[in-house]
Image: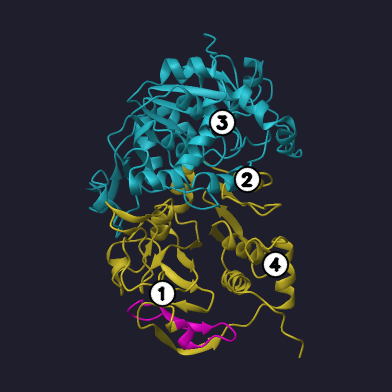
């Protein structure tokens, strides 16, 4: 057996997210770590993956790591550049986004996200960025993957503000409300992969990253986290995945 | 058509008055900092600032005290972190309290579209299950007269002035823009007045050689300002890169109001115009922001005489 390469939490998250994009046709990309993950997927499990950026770029092939989602490197060489009206109306609302990657300051057991305020809206303790496109993305993208580090401050019993709907109060709530997308499907964290594959649509651990125990996850989640009937260990990054990540992010900005 | 060229100083003095609503649009790209700085220099007050992503430009303007109200959909220093000045205004009322009115991105785009088309509202598939409508009474619901479905609507927005930055325009204001299109077209058509700021003024013939690239017609433009590098530290596709170092440095500068004011004193109040600002930045830095070349293949429109 070859020696397992050393890897960081971020690298494990990038690799897990990239692998989960197998089979996706289009992905709505965020900057930072999700951007590295999508570009890794494009060179590994999903060579035909079309990257869509919220700034209005369809089919981007960035030549450098973009700091912002509006970086000019995304425009040069892209398949198409579209107005925000077309992006949200013709691509997202039309149902052409297979997977969208989201994150937030707080998430609850049903995958509802808060990116608006900590504390009350009128007198916020911390004023966060707000929705951006997340609210309509959460409603309209076919599937949502959350990319978030586990922490008791982020994975909370009760979010302070519901910016972007996940499975709301659980069960079939999204369908009852007529939401086009299926909602949160995966949570890719620094310690484990979680999904919502049960009738309540409640977050559950399906895979622990190498060396992580259930108690490590429990200590970082603000409610009694559910375990899937069968849990696996996340395969660590392969030597090839490690090599490609170094190529994508040579200065280790997000790894 | 009339030659609409004005200096930035003239354009702001003529079209931006205290108490007005102003939209300076451009999503990460084409953000006209030159116009924002001139508004600060002319000490406008009580403005309603409208923008999907307030970005550093509104962070600076709000720190300088020009605004009473902010209408937006994403408050962040893109790829870096929070907008400290706006957070200070919202959380602590420094330098003055700031009213906020908040939508999602598509909600803001929809508001511009309804404003541009002179429609009473814009319907969109958003806000279902979200707390946003509970803190913004202008996000409402209508029932489709066709199938009874309940759908979210947002009201039109019609800024007193929209300011956009682009690569080139004719003296009459016919404007070519390529790169991120954002919501500049919708924001311009929604406005009562439009100021276009460009890297280059070109003959009408250049515009007519590529009519598909004309985003804004001179018909709705009131002033054309020639201001090279007017979008720095934002960028103009093909002309200069985003100054990411600036965006990272602002994260430090803006953490403290006194420090921010010192920056404004030096870089905004301390210079008479954009030309002086650029001289202060220095040619070496500006040269570093020049991208390599990647021209489009020419297109053939055909001659049908």
Q: In this view, which residue lies farthest toward the top?
A: B2
Disc 4, SS: helix
Q: Give the CA separation, mark 3 to mark 1.
A: 43 Å
> Can you tell which chain is drawn cyan?
B
Give the residue drawn at x 54%, y 36%.
B263
Give the residue drawn at x 47%, y 72%.
A187
Q: Which residues are magenta?
A: A196-217
Pointers 3 and 4 in contact (CB under 8 A)? no
Q: Which residue is mark 1?
A: A152
Q: Which residue is mark 3?
A: B266
Pointers 2 and 3 in contact (CB under 8 A)? no
Q: Give the CA separation, mark 3 to mark 4.
A: 42 Å
The verdict on residue A186 being magenta is no
Task: Say which mark, if any, is on residue A245.
Answer: 4
The answer to whether residue A135 of the structure is visible from this angle is yes
> Can you tell which chain is drawn yellow?
A
The verdict on residue A197 being magenta is yes
């Amino acid at each position: 057996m070859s020696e397992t390469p050393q890897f960081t939490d971020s690298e494990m998250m990038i690799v897990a997210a990239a692998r989960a994009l197998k089979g996706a046709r289009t992905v709505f990309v965020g900057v930072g770590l999700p951007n590295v993950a999508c570009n890794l997927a494009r060179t590994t499990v999903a060579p035909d993956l079309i990257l869509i950026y919220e700034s209005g770029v369809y089919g981007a092939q960035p030549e450098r790591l973009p700091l912002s989602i509006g970086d000019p490197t995304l425009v040069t060489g892209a398949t198409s550049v579209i107005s925000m009206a077309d992006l949200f109306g013709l691509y997202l609302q039309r149902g052409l986004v297979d997977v969208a990657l989201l994150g937030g300051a707080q998430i609850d057991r049903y995958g509802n996200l808060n990116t608006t305020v900590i504390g009350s809206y009128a007198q916020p303790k911390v004023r966060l960025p707000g929705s951006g496109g997340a609210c309509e993305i959460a409603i309209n993208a076919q599937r949502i993957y959350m990319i978030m580090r586990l922490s008791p401050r982020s994975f909370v019993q009760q979010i302070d503000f519901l910016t972007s709907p996940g499975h709301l109060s659980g069960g079939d709530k999204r369908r009852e409300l007529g939401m086009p997308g299926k909602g949160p499907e995966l949570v890719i964290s620094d310690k484990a992969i979680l999904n919502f594959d049960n009738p309540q649509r409640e977050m559950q651990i399906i895979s622990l990253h190498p060396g992580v125990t259930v108690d490590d996850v429990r200590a970082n989640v603000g409610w009694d986290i559910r375990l899937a009937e069968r849990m696996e260990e996340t395969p660590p990054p392969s030597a090839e995945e490690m090599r490609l990540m170094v190529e994508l992010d040579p200065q280790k900005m997000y790894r | 058509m009339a030659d609409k060229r004005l200096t930035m100083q003239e354009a702001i003095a003529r079209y931006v008055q205290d108490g007005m609503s102003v939209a300076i649009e451009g999503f990460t790209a084409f953000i006209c900092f030159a116009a924002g700085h001139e508004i600060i220099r002319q000490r406008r007050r009580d403005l309603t600032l409208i923008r999907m992503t307030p970005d550093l430009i509104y962070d600076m303007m709000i720190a300088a005290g020009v605004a009473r109200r902010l209408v937006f959909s994403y408050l962040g220093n893109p790829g870096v972190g929070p907008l400290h000045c706006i957070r200070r205004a919202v959380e602590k009322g420094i330098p003055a309290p700031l009213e906020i009115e908040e939508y999602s991105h598509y909600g803001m785009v929809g508001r511009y579209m309804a404003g541009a088309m002179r429609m009473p509202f814009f319907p969109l598939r958003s806000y279902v299950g979200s707390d946003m409508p509970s803190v913004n009474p202008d996000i409402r619901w209508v029932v489709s007269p066709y199938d009874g479905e309940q759908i979210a609507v947002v009201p039109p927005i019609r800024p007193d002035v929209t300011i956009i930055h682009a690569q080139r325009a004719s003296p009459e204001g016919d404007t070519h823009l390529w790169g991120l299109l954002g919501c500049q077209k919708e924001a311009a058509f929604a406005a009562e007045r439009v100021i276009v700021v460009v890297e280059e003024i070109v003959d009408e013939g250049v515009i007519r050689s590529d009519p598909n690239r004309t985003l804004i017609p001179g018909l709705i433009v009131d002033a054309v300002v020639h201001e090279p590098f007017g979008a720095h530290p934002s960028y103009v596709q093909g002309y200069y890169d985003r100054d990411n170092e600036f965006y990272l440095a602002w994260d430090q500068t803006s953490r403290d109001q006194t420090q921010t004011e010192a920056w404004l004193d030096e870089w905004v109040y301390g210079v008479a115009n954009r030309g002086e600002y650029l001289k202060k930045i220095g040619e070496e830095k500006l040269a570093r922001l020049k991208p390599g070349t990647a021209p489009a293949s020419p297109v053939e429109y055909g001659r049908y005489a």
